Amino acid sequence: MCIMSPMDNPFSTKFWALGVIPFQFSEPDESIDRLLDAVRQFPICQIVGPHGSGKSTLLLELRKRCETSGEQVKYLFFNDQKRHIPNNMTFHEKQMLFVDGFEQLSLFRQFWLRFRAQRLVLTTHYPVFFVPVLYRTKPQFTIFAQIVRQMVPNPPAEAVLKTVYERSGGNFRNAFLELYDLF
């Protein structure tokens, strides 16, 4: 019997952490290029979707593409443990600010950022009023199964994947954690 170390498990976070797996659109005609064009049109826009649906992954890909094209970019990440904006934060006129977890900030800090930053791209679970929606992430089983097949040469049976996906409520992150335990 082969004992697998936790880091060799194909569902270890090192194999699916933020930025490791590219974002996959649920619509076949959608593209990063179209979203980049929209990001450049709006001074503020948002990516909306439920937990574990790929918002952060999509934001990271947009950020990388903006940096590659020479744009000035700043990235802020907020979660349950981190909800504070750095005290020494400065804003440049042409700089684009990517805020992952915007809803984690207090209402005061949300308004503060909206009025200080010239260009702003947010991730949120629910739409922020008066901010155009750039994209809505929609978890789908077919995308989840496709990602699993990319990660593992011999993936679990389709029925197992479906059960894990449904138990997670469509949250890819939670489904990967459960697959880690199963594998």
Image (cartoon, helix red, strand yellow):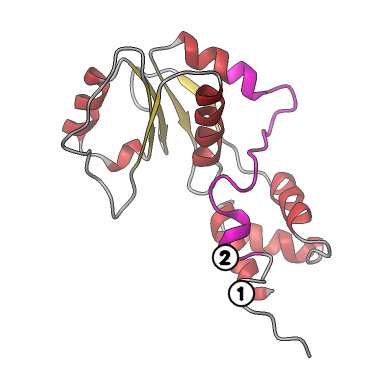
- Relative to 42, does residue 159 appear above or below in the rendering? below
Categorize mark 1 by other alpha carbons within 10 Å: few (<14), some (14-19), many (20+).
few
Residue at x-position 78% and y-position 66%: 156
Residue 177 is tagged as 2
- Check disc 1 and report its element: helix, strand or loop: helix
Does residue 160 show up?
yes
Instruction: Residue 124: name its quadrant.
Output: top left
The stretch in magenta equals 11-35
Residue at image coords 61%, 61% = 176
> How packed is label 2: few (under 14 Cα within 10 Å), some, or many (20 or more)?
some
Placement of the N terminus among the 4 image quadrants: bottom right
144 displayed left or right of 40? right
Q: Nearer the viewer, residue 167 or 58?
A: 58
Q: Which residue is mark 1?
A: 181
Quadrant of the frame with the C terminus: bottom right
Q: Quadrant of residue 97?
A: top left
* Residue 175 visible at all: no
Q: Main secondary structure of the magenta part?
A: loop
Q: Amino acid at mark 2?
A: Leu
